[in-house]
Amino acid sequence: MEAKEKEILNELISGTKCQFVIPVFQRNYDWRIKDCIRLFNDVIDLAQDKDHPDRKHFMGAFVCKFTRFVDTNYNQFVLIDGQQRLTSITLILKALYDYLGQFGDKYEEVRNEITETYLINKFAKDSTLRLKLKPNQVDNDNFNKLMNDEPVDPDSTIGRNYREFKKMIEGMKVPFEDFYNALQRLEGVVVYLDDSDNPQVIFESLNSTGLELTDVDLIRNYLLMNCKAEEQDELYKKYWLNIEKLMGDRFLQFIRDYLSLKNGIVTPNTKNVPYSTFQKFYRSKGFDRTDFLSHLYKMAQIYNRLLVPSADSKVLLNSLEDYSSLDITTTYPFVFGLLIDNTPDETGAKKIADDSLAKILRVLEAYLIRRNVCNLAGGGMSQVMASLYNDIMKKHGEKFYADPVKKVANALAGISTKAYFPKDDEFVREFTTRDMYHTRNIFYILKKMELNKQGKEVIDFSNLSVEHILPQTLSDEWVKYLNRQDWKEFHESYCHRIGNLSLTAYNTEMSNKLYKEKKVHMDFSRLILNQYFNSIDDWKDEKAIDDRGDDLAEIALKLWPFPKVTSIEDIATESHFLLDDEEYDYAGTNPAGIQIREEKIIEDSWSNLYVATIKYLYKINQELLVFLMSKKELFSSERFLISDSKEALTRPAIVDDGLYVETNNNTERKIKILKILLSNMQFEPDEVVIFIK
């Protein structure tokens, strides 16, 4: 390695028979307007500093690797770093050259110097060597057109920044001679690498000092930097460029979700973490570069189905479109794995059929909608979704594909962390009582309920919006119509509930109309969802809104049902003989259920399992169960464990009509009570099995 401080124009790019090549692995030219203005002002500052005519402006490091073309005797410098600045300087020179052209032959000598010294190799016979700067694949076309005075894509960064530099040159207050002289006083440290230097290590070192490179830039460079130019070009065009076109600004998300799926843990969106995670993954697998890029391109094509839904069947397409419209990207790693299994192999076979995947997506939709309605954000769902595919495969292996819908449903229903699948009671309670207007995907929820009523889509939803029956802002007419002293409290509590929400297409002038005017409006009444109001005369009390909320809740339960778990074993991860497990610590665990002889009881909380087990024992022998639980000394208890009076218990749960059991005990205490009951009712140790999630 050799490093020298040099003037950029006169000591770096002014040499004869030389060309600076920006390799395909480098990011595109992406300087912003503000970057251009900053560089231009730095040059102007130099030009105006008459007290220090020899002052220079340092522009950082320019790292390149030298290659000589023996047949043409040209020197080629592959830019490892500095391509953004060198491209911008070249655009300034071109803008200055064109600006001076308006004066005819007056500045012909200066123009010739600019073009023949800094922009082109005048005597190059090979057209590919004519320009001194050769941008990467994406920028090369517009750059060549600009240098050949051909029309340039006006939206390209090359064209935009050239126009900005030319505009600033045309408006500058310093003589062009001073400006041109100042350009020649830009300098940097030029680092020349030799064959013993590792460009990737040097590149990463430079990046760590603050150059703004994305994780995608780093991954691309990691894959393409240490191979020959011809191979770089082929791999870039054949694979990487096509992945870029598919992913667009979702490229990093694709990489993160790919790594999350493969590693089974979330790949954080912290700067440089996806890159370092990718490095470890790539090295640990011992991939061949070409094979991996080919694989990554195939994965990108599959992942693109999440971004632009596509499927071989209508039923899967509908499910995929609905799922994608929810835009809950934390679930993408899991669905990505399923889509891979839904992709045909060489024989055209799919591990997961279209209809099965469509049903799985509906189960996942129910899980997401229920959590959304219950306001259960976070809860470790990102990690659950990152590991779920691998967890299912680890548990079932190839048997997963025999009934994937059931196994995914059981896996989701069996989540025992804060990322749990809300059951019906919680879902209905939250659905009917909380603020649903500000709930994510409220339009989707109402749309799906309207479609459920219609059976098929017969209206255009694109011009519909969520409407409050009782308006968000009450007019004097509405206050008079309500005719109640507590109208403010009523409005605050009920305005945003689901029972007060619907879809309409009418304009804002109608939104504050009184109920009777609103419900007969054509754009309101044509929705089947709103035909409910035909038989409702008034809309002024809690019961009216609650009743409609209950009506919509019935639809919601059908649209987004909780999975029917038929087997404890499907959701359990371990099991124990309850009467023979003195050393097992149940604290912090969640049950999947209990089996007593042939009876299986599925419950996912210790409180519910405790009550359900007591109900079962009561059914077997009512008198004995009540007798045992009434004996305080048997349980070393000072409180009643069972009573015919709710008031006698702290937290009663009903066992039968007029009979209640105390549930205000911790998990350890509940387990101890069950063990005493089961032992005294003569159950053998191997007849009672407890299942843990």
Image (cartoon, rainbow, N blue to C red):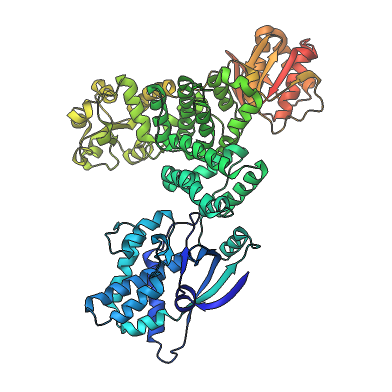
Q: How far across and down, in percent of the image, does residue 13 sit? A: 46, 73
> Would you place residue 239 above or below residue 391 in this image?
below
Q: How far across and down, in percent of the image, does residue 84 sit? A: 45, 65
> Would you place residue 134 above or below residue 10 in this image?
above
In which quadrant of the rendered image does the C terminus lie?
top right
* Residue 624 in view (yes/no): yes
* Residue 380 in view (yes/no): no
**Extreme residue in the front direction:** 71
Q: Is residue 436 left or right of residue 344?
A: left
Query: 486 and 49: which one is in front?
Result: 49
Q: How far across and down, in percent of the image, does residue 445 sit? A: 38, 30
Q: Quadrant of residue 603?
A: top right
Report how many numbered discs are placed on residues in the image. 0
Q: Is residue 521 left or right of residue 304?
A: left
In which quadrant of the rendered image does the N terminus lie?
bottom right
**Extreme residue in the bottom direction:** 51
Query: 279 and 20: which one is in front?
Result: 20
> Would you place residue 178 above or below residue 375 in this image?
below
Residue at point 57% right, 76% down? 4
Q: Is residue 104 left or right of residue 282?
A: left
Residue at point 76% right, 25% down? 637
Residue at point 49% right, 22% down? 348
Q: How far across and down, in percent of the image, does residue 281 sit? A: 63, 44
Residue at point 30% right, 79% down? 172
Query: 134 and 427: which one is in front?
Result: 134
